[in-house]
Amino acid sequence: MPKDFGHGSPVCVCDATYCDTLDPLVVPAPGSYVKYESSKAGKRLERSEGKFQSRMSTRGIEYNLIRVPMACSDFSVRPYSYDDVPMDYELKHFRLADEDVEMKIPLLRRALAMSKRPLLLFASPWTAPAWMKSNGDVRGKGTLKGKAGDKYHKTWANYFIKFLDEYAKRNVTFWAVTAQNEPLAGLFTPPQAPTIAFTAAQQRDFIAQDLGPALARSSHRTRLLMLDDQRIHLPHWAKVVLGNATAARYVAGLAVHWYLDAIVPPAWSLEATHKLFPDHFLLYTEACTGFFMFRFAVSLGCWERGDHYSYSILTVMNHFVSGWTDWNLALDLGGGPNWVKNFVDSPIIVDGSKDVFYKQPMFYHMGHFSKFIPEGSRRVGLHSSRRCLLCQLEHVAVLRPDGALVLVVLNRFGRDVPFGIRDPAMGFIETVAPAHSIQTYLWRQQ
């Protein structure tokens, strides 16, 4: 049921007895197409059908990428690590926390059981145990003690393996790990935030001498992603890390965050990196809205925050990025919990006092991609005439593994925009992108 909180667009209210769902996706017969539309006016993945002219459950939006913090992040309820016994270089006292055993793992196993598609889990560390850090605290800014190849770095690399081992014992395996969450942006976070700082050269050496070999020796087929920070560091970080043949051998891809995207164009960072290192994929691994908003971290029903998500996804997909991950699956009404008080917004907001949760416009914006573009899809060429300079539409076209085509169209402006879609193999669709809307078109070629 919709509810308007006065922020421009309604949310969907869900409780134990009701939540809106989507029917399982069915690709239409050749010659037909289906369109799914969401809008600021209140449409939410509304389905319609048409014909070409001769010129996590299948009832959800099917997320398939999940990021899991390795021990605490700022969005934990407390700071903690898995081994607080000083000088335990053999990690004999390594133990998962109650948060893992009682909450994360049961939820992940439920999600894995419900999903009809493979779920790809990747883990990211925020901080090492206090005794490994230069500042002697899991909180705050610090580096790993010593240098690459020494006992601290070897122990920290083995900490990753212990984490993977313990989750695997509980039937949860990871597709990838990132070497460190925000190794440079951590220098600008709140003073108490859990972090370890690395330069590009330090990450290169840690990967080449410690983490890469540890993963290769382990029984896990887990991929390694470098950076996990802002794209302003590209292509410099890629040149430093992947320019080293030893480090490059262990790295599968580059993890990117969205927070400073406005500073550097995607062609100068993402596309430039892809051209230099085409065998290493680019993956967006963190995004959220509402950060640094001291009054309105959470803005229930804000359509523009959904626009921001879709604009980012469309932009980076058109510059060789292969996936996009939100930060928090769900938060409370205050934008937490967060023990550093770094409150932000989320596509799903939970009101525990009423036993309900709200699906925001951001949720439906993400669904226009995640529901329709499965793993293994490929971006395809799309020519746009761009005849209307004042009503430009953003878009991306994708070929699915089953041969169906997907076109996502975003209209961020306050006017309806008529446009046409021509597929040489099928014909022509004459349609309209309503003001402040996002549409997904799906069809099968002959």
Image (cartoon, rainbow, N blue to C red):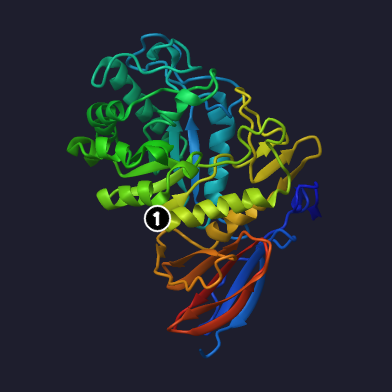
Query: What residue occupies the far bottom of the structure in this picture?
Result: 54
- Check the image and report above or below for 402 versus 52: above
Relative to residue 32, is residue 209 drawn left or right?
Answer: left
- Check the image and report above or below for 182 versus 364: above
Q: Which residue is mark 1?
A: 319
The one nearer the camera, 275 or 202, is 275
Q: Residue at x 38, y 55 (%)?
A: 320
Percent from the top left, x then y, of residue 368?
A: 58, 60
> Residue 240's quadrant in the figure?
top left
Whether residue 173 is visible to the viewer of this picture, yes or no, is no
Query: What residue occupies the far left of the structure in this picture?
Result: 245
Q: In the image, what residue type sits under mark 1? A: His
The one nearer the camera, 33 or 300, is 300
Percent from the top left, x then y, of residue 74?
A: 56, 26
Q: In which quadrant is the N terminus drawn?
A: bottom right
Q: Residue at x 72, y 40 (%)?
A: 350
Q: Residue at x 56, y 25 (%)?
A: 98
Percent from the top left, x then y, of residue 144?
A: 36, 18
Whether residue 107 is visible to the viewer of this picture, yes or no, is yes
The one nearer the camera, 149 or 158, is 149
> Residue 164's quadrant in the figure?
top left
Relative to residue 331, is residue 380 drawn left or right?
Answer: left
Relative to residue 47, is residue 218 drawn left or right?
Answer: left
